[in-house]
Image (tube, rainbow, N blue to C red):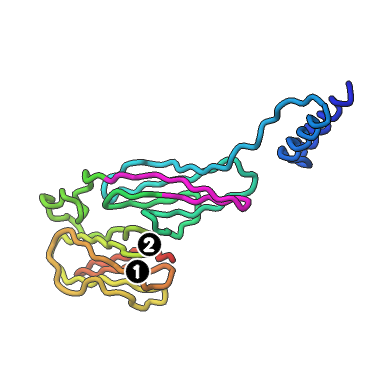
């Protein structure tokens, strides 16, 4: 074995052990070329990129989940999701949401001081569940057969949340939102409501971040749901 082979074996061992980075090995190879030593062309480190995987189409009120991934960085990754340009406050690798109309999703991935973004356009159709108040199919939908308080959407939210509820018969309804200390922060409905599918907007813009409880009382029926406000 000649000296050049020994040098290459040292570089390969140091690279495998983590003592020498690929970039440092490439720099050393360029110095060898400048001094007349033959050396093979070494691959450069792959560029840092971010990606989104998930559905590209949904029906109204149908929830979808999207997952971020990345390549080309050696450190740990951190994530932040945006919906139609607005910061959702979600920092997990996956994000779940729904919508009434088309929207854009983007995720920013950061690692080792580098930042990359990935984007996905999601189209929303109108072939939705007829039990949803904002679906066109509701115009011919029958009266619901049971009381129901549906999950608030979007959740988590930093703006307007839609709270949907079903009444199989006319009832005196009280629909309110409380913080975790039991203090009422919003009154969405209070009085007689006809049977049918109903919705009420909950404006969360001025509230501190945290978990809130949505409670409905309609006759003898009572139910609660939770919604998270983010900033």
Does label 1 or label 2 sit earlier along the sequence? 2
Q: Which residue appears farthest toward the left when viewing the image?
A: 140
> Dot 2 corresponds to which residue?
157
* 105 lies left or right of 58: right
State the image coordinates of residue 27 (x, y, percent, origin top left): 75, 37
State the image coordinates of residue 152 (x, y, percent, origin top left): 32, 60
Residue located at (41% from left, 67% from top): 211
Specify few, some or many for label 1: CA neighbours under 10 Å numbering under 14, 14-19, or 20 or more: many
**Which quadrant would residue 224 be assigned to in this image?**
bottom left
State the image coordinates of residue 144 (x, y, percent, origin top left): 16, 55
Q: Nearer the viewer, residue 81 or 226?
A: 81
Indicate whether 72 appears above or below 12. Answer: below
Residues under numbered marks 1 and 2 in contact, where contact means CB atoms less than 8 Å apart: yes
Specify few, some or many for label 2: CA neighbours under 10 Å numbering under 14, 14-19, or 20 or more: many
Task: Please state, as top left, top right, bottom left or bottom right, where the C terminus lies in the image.
Answer: bottom left
Residue located at (22% from left, 47% from top): 129
> Dot 1 corresponds to which residue?
204
Extent of the magenta region: 106-124
Tell me, for residue 228, which label it has, or none: none
Q: Nearer the viewer, residue 146 or 178?
A: 178
Cα gap from disc 1 to disc 2, whole angstroms: 8 Å
Based on the picture, tell me whether residue 196 belongs to the magenta stretch. no
Main structural element of the magenta stretch: helix, strand or loop? Answer: strand
Indicate whether 68 appears above or below 183. Answer: above
**Which quadrant would residue 20 be assigned to in this image?**
top right
Label 2 residue SS: loop
Label 1 residue SS: loop
């Amino acid at each position: 074995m000649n000296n050049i082979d020994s040098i290459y074996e040292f570089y390969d061992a140091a690279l495998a052990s983590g003592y020498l980075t690929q970039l440092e090995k490439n720099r050393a190879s360029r110095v060898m070329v400048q001094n007349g030593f033959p050396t093979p062309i070494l691959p450069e480190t792959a560029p840092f990129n971010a990606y989104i995987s998930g559905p590209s189409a949904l029906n109204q009120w149908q929830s979808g989940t999207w997952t971020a991934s990345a390549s080309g960085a050696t450190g740990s990754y951190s994530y932040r999701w945006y919906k139609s340009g607005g910061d959702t406050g979600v920092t997990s690798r996956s994000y779940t949401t729904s919508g009434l109309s088309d929207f854009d999703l983007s995720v920013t991935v950061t690692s080792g001081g580098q930042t990359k973004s990935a984007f996905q356009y999601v189209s929303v159709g109108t072939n939705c569940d007829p039990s949803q108040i904002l679906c066109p199919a509701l115009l011919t939908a029958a009266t619901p057969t049971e009381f129901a308080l549906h999950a608030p959407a979007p959740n988590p939210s930093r703006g307007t949340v839609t709270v949907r509820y079903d009444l199989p018969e006319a009832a005196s309804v009280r629909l309110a939102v409380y913080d975790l200390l039991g203090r009422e922060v919003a009154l969405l409905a209070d009085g007689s409501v006809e049977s049918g599918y109903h919705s009420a907007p909950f404006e969360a813009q001025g509230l501190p971040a945290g978990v809130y409880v949505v409670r409905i009382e309609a006759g003898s029926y009572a139910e609660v749901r939770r919604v998270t406000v983010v900033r």
